[in-house]
Amino acid sequence: MSALAALRRVRLILASGVIVRAIAWGLAAAGTLLIGAVLADIAAPLALGVREALLWIAGASGLCVAFALAVRDRAVLSARDVALWIEEREPALRFRLISAVELGDPRLARDVAPRRWPVLAMRRTGRALATPALIVAVIGALLVLLPAGAVARVRGPRAGDSLERAGVRSSGASRLEPLVALVIAPAYAHAAPRSIDNPATIRALVGSEIVLRGRGAAAGIFARIGNDSVSAASDSADRWSIAARAPVTPAAIELVDRGYEKIITSEPIHDAPPVVTLASPARDTVLRVARGRLSLAATASDDIALESVWFELIVSSGEGETFTFRSAELHKTPVHGKAFDLSGALSLDSLHLKAGDILHVRAAARDANDVSGPGVGYSETRAIRVARPGEYDSVALDAAPPTDEDKSIVSERMLIMLAEALDRQRPTLVHDSLVRESQSIAADQKRLRRTVGDVVFSRLGGSPSGEETVGADSPARARTMQELLARADSATSRAIDPTDFGGGEAPVIAVNTPLLEAYNAMWDAGGALEIGEPGRALPFMRRALAAIERARQAERVYLHGRAPQIVVDVGRARLQGKDKGSSSTRRPLTASDSAAQTRELRFARAMEMLDRARPAAIDSLLLLRIDALSSAPELAAALRDATTALRGDEARAAATALARARRALGGIPVARDSLSRWGVVP
Amino acid sequence: MFATAQYESGDWDSAPFVPANIIDTIARYTEIPVAPIGVVAPLSEERMLRYPLLYLTGHLPVRFNAAEQRNVRRFVERGGLLFVDDHDHDVDGVFHKSATEEIARAAGPLAELPNDHPLYSSFFKFDGPPATSQELNGWGDNLVHTHLLAVQREGRIAVLYSSKDYSSEWNYHPENKRFLAVDNTRFAVNLAVYALTA
């Protein structure tokens, strides 16, 4: 073997040693942290998140140590450094080896004897590895000697592993702690089983199986769910379990072990029916002739899984009291997944629709729920009507321009936007500019007010602009709505008939009241705008807009026939019936929400109990939560947080959640005639 | 206030005289304060929740839109009574099929109401739902329905469904009641009393 070949071999041995040593120290560092975490977990249970974090920290620290050592000893890769290392141990070489390496001339080291060099390197490597190897061995032994479950909780943390935690338990201790719930969703949901450690609430899809597991023998442990009682079964020597179907309604699962009790709330998750939206046809339609193809499109989605999607149609024919119907399903498509877009076409010719027929189209979807369902969701229905022959018999008319009210509403809306913009810019504008801009809006407002006045006066039979022709500054101008109403009255010269419209208004006044109110509001708005106060003008302008809107609505004309309105003379009919019933068999319904009062009372009782009987108070809050789940979800959510925090001894979080619960209960403080007991939430 | 439910699909106002007739009947037999005219309560608007009793009828398909469905659900949860009558008097008709389907979606499945239910004795005594002339004349589905259907919540009727076509039976001017030997609208009093009492 040549000197340089021996050198390379020595370098390989030393490099291997460096790498192995770095890995060993890395393992030692990670193992030490793991053992520390295991011991800490045995002393006091560590949360899942903490254990996951510790595992990452241990891995990262091991890698860091290994990397740092490898970098520190990187000189082992250099042939020159390795040559020097050999020269140090073999003084007889007299720098021939390093000279050969540095000058690249192997002849300089041709008469050296390199046989011992690998042996030296092996010995050095062995010494360097001894300490870390010993530490790794000790750590390994400790990991073997520590309880397997305790190590597993740190090595592979997962939900539901609290049963694995090592700890000394006396025979009289509750077997309900620790507790793990395994929720197995029904097969159609295709969901993996889910474990929950020490649950206060179990949310499970309806049809799920809930398996509660604990440590200790099964004898004497049972659960009460509603009226049913389920005894625990032995899983293994030191494990018990209770399996039950998740209740359909919110319920309390009461676990009993001798004198120990634990209440868990079961909150069912109901599989919602699919949500279906019909995209095409987009709106109801009237067709003159029912020919051609109608394109259909819909989207369906479900919270769990869809099973099928289809279109439904109903054709109704006839009128009055005589109707016939045909119905059909179209494009029924099996679906696997949570969402689906369905499209298709419908030939109207194939339906043989006659004049007056109505085609109702909607989309529907069924979910895969084979436990409590299936849930069926429907889209909104579109009606496609075939016009009757006489329907289009009408005098040809040109389209009318928008009414004055319609024009006014647009303008008033525009003026409001201008005034709002000006009001926003107000801090940045100098006063003169503000007043100038404001007066410009005021001028438009005045023009608009005159238009509205013209509408009112022309309706009242007077000449258009009759109210404004007297001039803007005329003292004769009406200044209040009452004056305008009086003018309107006099303009029509009608006597007020108190039987009309029930409020003592003449019909003409009743019709015009919104416009007159708008007129009056515009007047006030104009005044504020004139002096550069757009902010003050805005409420009046908005009132004017609302009044114009009301006027527009009031005059909407419906063209379908209406039955005459019958006003029953209740006074005359009162107790004129020949038959007599029994009016005393039932009592009037209470107006107040008695359920809310009951909840409030129960909450108050639980709060009273919190200081002296904390577990009982928590159980009371849990039971209250079960009742509140369907009727008062906000309260139920607050109580869930409160009970979780109370069980976890988190005083601040509990106080916040209880305050939320109190607000959700009704909120309005009740004044009492005596001082209540002072106290704090623990 | 006697309220007639207005829904987007179908002919919700197919029995325009029924509200006045029921108002007249309530006044005729009870001292319950009642407004002289009925109101129309669109199911899509929240104000429908103000009325304890809602009357819904029609011949055409009933398809609640999202707002209508949501409000109907809230209405029955708040203790209201929705009285649905099939103006088609036909269990094979589209009103029956679509309305029962919509009720199931909004309030729950319908079940036969026993003929000794408190509804039938809340004011007048009945041995079950009174028959209508439409049934007896063999119109519609040619059946005399022996039971009404109902969705019950906590022992109380939330939705009452009739295939007996009271909408046709009661759809006449209240003044014409004087020509009847037996007032055929008395069952409406039971409905109103039941809706207003516990």
Image (spheres, coloured by chain):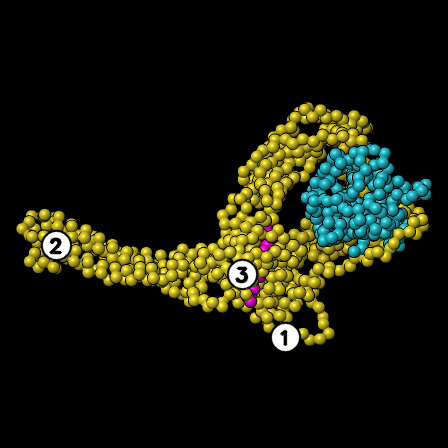
On the rendered structure, is A666 left or right of A173?
Answer: right
Instruction: Verify whether residue A132 appears in magenta.
Output: no
Residue A535 location, x and y as percent? 69, 57
Quadrant into which the C terminus of chain A falls? bottom right
Mark 2 or mark 3: whose residue is earlier in sequence = 2
Q: Residue at x 14, y 57 (%)?
A: A120
Mark 1 or mark 3: whose residue is earlier in sequence = 3
Q: Amino acid at mark 1?
A: Trp
Which residue has dot 1 on it? A678
On the rendered structure, is B87 left or right of A652?
Answer: right
Q: Residue at x 68, y 49 (%)?
A: A417
Q: Amino acid at mark 2?
A: Trp
Q: Amino acid at mark 3?
A: Ile
Which residue has dot 2 on it? A117
Tag 2, which secondary structure?
Answer: helix
Quarter holding residue A279: top right
The residue closer to the viewer here, A435 or B155, is: B155
Start and end of the magenta stretch?
A: A259-269
Q: CA distance from mark 1 to mark 2?
A: 86 Å
Instruction: Verify whether residue A260 appears in magenta.
Output: yes
The yellow-tinted chain is: A
Which residue has dot 3 on it? A221
On the rendered structure, is A149 left or right of A20?
Answer: right
